[in-house]
Image (tube, rainbow, N blue to C red):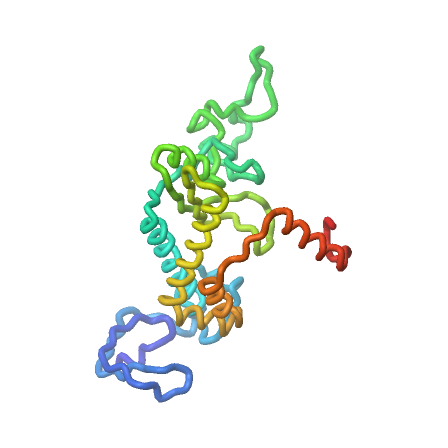
Amino acid sequence: TAIDNLTTGCSVHAIGKIIPSQGGKQAVELSATSIRVVGTCPGDTFPLAKKRHTLEYLRTIAHLRPRTNTIAAVARVRSTLAGSIHAFFQEQGFQYVQTPLITASDCEGAGEMFRVTTLDIDDVDSLPRAKDDDGKVLPGVEYAEDFFGKAAFLTVSGQLGGETHACALGDIYTFGPTFRAENSQTARHLAEFWMVEPEMAFADLTSAMDNAEAMLKFVVGVALEKCDEDLTFFSKFFDKGLKDRLEKVVNKPFVRVSYRDAIGHLQEEIAKDPSKWQFP
């Protein structure tokens, strides 16, 4: 029978009624009147067991990790956040600008960039060498012979493209992947991430802060409204104070501190125990 083929990981087509659960770990369950196994799966070798797995382990089975509660919840929340970011800026009259992912510009100049090349770096001897005006070979590669005719990289920011468009279109925003090649293993550094960068023509610091605060309140508010079940899951298993903090983001005004006052507060904290600071 079909029931005999029900294993962890299999795909099924079921018809029935949603009823209050007889168990204690969920609110509802499906009382099936018919069931058909669409795709079988060897349950004894399926790598996702009915237990919690570490995120490190899930990295090794990237094709299956979206089936876990954690990664699925992250995907749903991220989808909602992305949609609400676009909704906020569109409602505010901003134009969405798609800036290049491959660029010759080091926009921020503060970090390492991933290089993009079609040169055969596996055959070092074949690489074209840079030369001076006298034909003397210089250290480095002659990127004039590369695909773009110059050195190219994955973008670290869409800011430069955004600024040029803002000068023509008014208020714009970019929202897309950016890349940083700092070889850091901390939770504060990512090799790839999506970044929102609004650019407003004729804006001052106050209007920029107003825009940032309004955007965060809007986006977080949408997440609280549409992703309550997923945020409750995060609060239960990862961060117990998450939802309370998010509610405060939406309901309380942001504190704004001048640079002078911020430095004063920082100096006060350092004075309490300079040994806790790497660069006091």
Residue 191 visible in image: yes
Q: Position of residue 197 (x, y in %)?
A: 44, 45
Q: Is residue 57 above or below residue 118?
A: below
Which of 210 and 61 lies nearest the eye of the viewer? 210
> Number of callouts in the render?
0
User: Which residue does the image show at 61% across and 24% down from the upper left?
Assistant: 139
Q: Position of residue 23 (x, y in %)?
A: 38, 87
Quadrant where the N terminus is found in the figure: bottom left
Q: Position of residue 75 (x, y in %)?
A: 40, 61
Left-right relation of 27 to 106: left
Residue 3 occupies which quadrant of the picture? bottom left
Left-right relation of 182 to 167: right
Q: Position of residue 32 (x, y in %)?
A: 25, 82
Which of 123 and 30 lies nearest the eye of the viewer? 30
User: Which residue does the image show at 35% across and 55% down from the upper left?
Assistant: 83
Residue 64 visible in image: no
Which of 122 and 89 lies nearest the eye of the viewer? 89
Left-right relation of 55 to 262: left
Which of 78 and 33 lies nearest the eye of the viewer? 78
Q: Is residue 274 above or below residue 260?
A: below
Residue 203 occupies which quadrant of the picture? top left
Seen as rendered, the residue at the extreme bottom is 22
User: Which residue does the image show at 28% across and 85% down from the upper left?
Assistant: 19
Q: Is residue 170 above or below residue 40?
A: above
